Image (cartoon, helix red, strand yellow):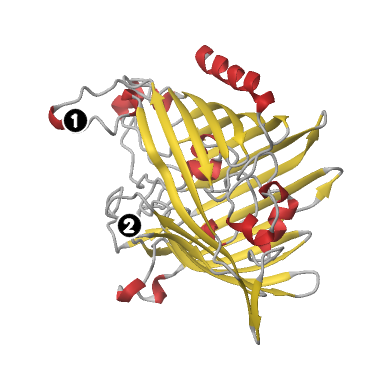
């Protein structure tokens, strides 16, 4: 911990020489605005204007020329961007001695792991028509994988003081919230204020751990105004359903996601206060992580959550406050948000139960659009079954974490991140358990 504190202090000492920060440039090219027009503190945290731009379906134009005609209005250029993340991660676990040809050693973070291209994505996005936009994300380094990683096509109608819309979408990893979400607290995986997503977001603590690994395809029906938004989505935990004749029938989209959030401004603090619920049983398109589910069989998609976000200023500097609680039950079908399978526990054992977490975090800007530091606490239970022998050895389901973060912007579109998490709780009470994780990351967009 001392080394991490010193590293963060070193970043703070150098911060006075850095310029203002920016973010993913695709929409900046379309609007002619610096990315800080949409982002508070640092990318990808959205401010009020950024939420409005997203809610309108990425359609707002600026100085960029348009090609226009009868029922046609598109940018003169297809706006693109690349986002790259290079990470180094290290934890306390024992490193694996490299066997012949190094097989098996590369996946152990205890060795110290360089992840060149943890994310290396090609984005296209922006206006399709006056009331239709799009976002495309493509993989560029995933070996043997498809190009498409995510796509959505928001079709929004201006109803005076409100926007009503439908967004067809598919994603290989970002979950059902990819269809429509305006918060920055990690309700949707890509919009989180810190890199260690499971440690700072209760919703992400449950997400992509079960049989769906974050896959989702569906249609988000939404309504939004200055006071808040409603999202009702029909979906399935599958990616690219029916693409190129794959033919997964639409009746398998039997899961429902309901999200309601208020977006008031109280004093000088802009807030997002809401709740969400996933329910239903649908086909999964991913290889199973837990028995008895396998790819193409029915799984449960059950989770409920509450979230709170407040963005304002303290001592003249920007600050974000984030609070979440999420709970996902174990089920006999396997749950997309809880990998545990319900079973009758023998005497002295702990049966599979709800996987749940509560997180609270604070992100504070030390130097505007240059350096932000943060801290978060997670109180969680894994929901996993624990045998009688493990109980006698002191094992349980508690899984807590304390996380420190720092984001330092070298230039407008290049940032350094440090995240350090310390874990505790009786779920980690065994030899070789992970007790800490440190991530150093270089993030760049152009």
Direction from residue 295 to residue 273 in the image, left or right: right
The residue indicated by pointer 2 is: 286
Q: Position of residue 332 (x, y in %)?
A: 35, 53
Residue 49, image x, y percentages: 74, 54
* Occupied quadrant, residue 296: bottom left
Tell me if I can see residue 280 in this picture: no
Q: Vertical placement of 388 versus 321: above or below? A: above
- Crowd rating for badge 1 (residues with CA inside 10 Å; few <14, some 14–19, many 20+): few
Q: Which mark is residue 102?
A: 1
Q: In terms of secondary structure, where does tag 1 sit?
A: helix
Is there a contact, CB below 8 Å, between mark 1 and mark 2? Answer: no
Residue 62 in view, yes or no: yes
Whole-Å distance between the Cαs marked 1 and 2?
28 Å
Q: For the point 51% across and 44% down, which residue is it?
A: 204
Looking at the image, is 131 positioned above or below residue 388? below
The secondary structure type at the circle numbered 2 is: loop
């Amino acid at each position: 911990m001392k080394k991490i504190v010193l590293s963060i202090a070193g970043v703070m000492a150098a911060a006075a020489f850095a310029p203002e920060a920016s973010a993913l440039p695709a929409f900046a090219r379309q609007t002619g605005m610096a990315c800080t027009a949409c982002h508070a503190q640092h990318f990808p945290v959205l401010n009020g204007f950024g939420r409005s731009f997203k809610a309108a379906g990425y359609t707002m134009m600026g100085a960029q020329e348009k090609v226009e005609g009868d029922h046609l209005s598109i940018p003169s250029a297809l706006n693109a961007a690349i986002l790259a993340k290079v990470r180094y991660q290290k934890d306390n676990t024992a490193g694996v001695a490299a066997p012949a040809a190094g097989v098996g050693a590369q996946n152990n973070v205890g060795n110290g792991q360089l992840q060149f291209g943890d994310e290396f994505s090609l984005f296209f996005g922006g206006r399709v028509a006056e009331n239709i936009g799009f976002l495309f994300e493509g993989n560029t380094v995933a070996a043997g994988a498809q190009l498409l990683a995510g796509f959505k096509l928001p079709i929004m109608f201006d109803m005076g003081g409100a926007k009503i819309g439908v967004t067809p979408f598919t994603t290989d990893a970002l979950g059902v919230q990819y269809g429509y979400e305006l918060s920055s607290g990690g309700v949707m995986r890509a919009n989180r204020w810190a890199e260690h997503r499971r440690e700072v977001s209760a919703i992400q603590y449950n997400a992509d751990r079960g049989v769906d690994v974050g896959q989702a395809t569906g249609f988000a029906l939404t309504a939004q105004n200055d006071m808040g938004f409603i999202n009702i989505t029909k979906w399935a935990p599958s990616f690219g359903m029916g693409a190129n004749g794959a033919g997964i029938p639409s009746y398998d989209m039997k899961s429902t996601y309901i999200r309601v959030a208020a977006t008031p401004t109280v004093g000088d603090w802009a807030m997002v206060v809401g709740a969400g619920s996933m329910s239903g049983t649908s086909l999964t398109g991913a290889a199973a992580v837990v028995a008895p589910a396998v790819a193409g069989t029915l799984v449960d998609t059950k989770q409920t959550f509450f979230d709170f976000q407040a963005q304002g200023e303290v001592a003249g500097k920007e600050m974000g406050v984030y609070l979440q609680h999420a709970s996902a039950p174990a089920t006999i079908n396997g749950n997309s948000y809880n990998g545990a399978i319900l079973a009758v526990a023998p005497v002295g054992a702990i049966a599979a139960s709800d996987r749940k977490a509560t997180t609270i975090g604070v992100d504070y800007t030390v130097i505007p659009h240059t350096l932000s530091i943060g801290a978060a606490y997670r109180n969680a239970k894994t929901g996993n079954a624990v045998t009688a022998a493990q109980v006698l050895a002191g094992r349980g389901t508690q899984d807590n974490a304390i996380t420190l973060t720092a984001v330092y912007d070298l230039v407008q579109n290049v940032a350094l991140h440090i995240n350090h998490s310390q874990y505790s709780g009786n779920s980690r009470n065994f030899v070789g358990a992970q007790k800490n994780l440190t991530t150093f990351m270089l993030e760049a967009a152009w």
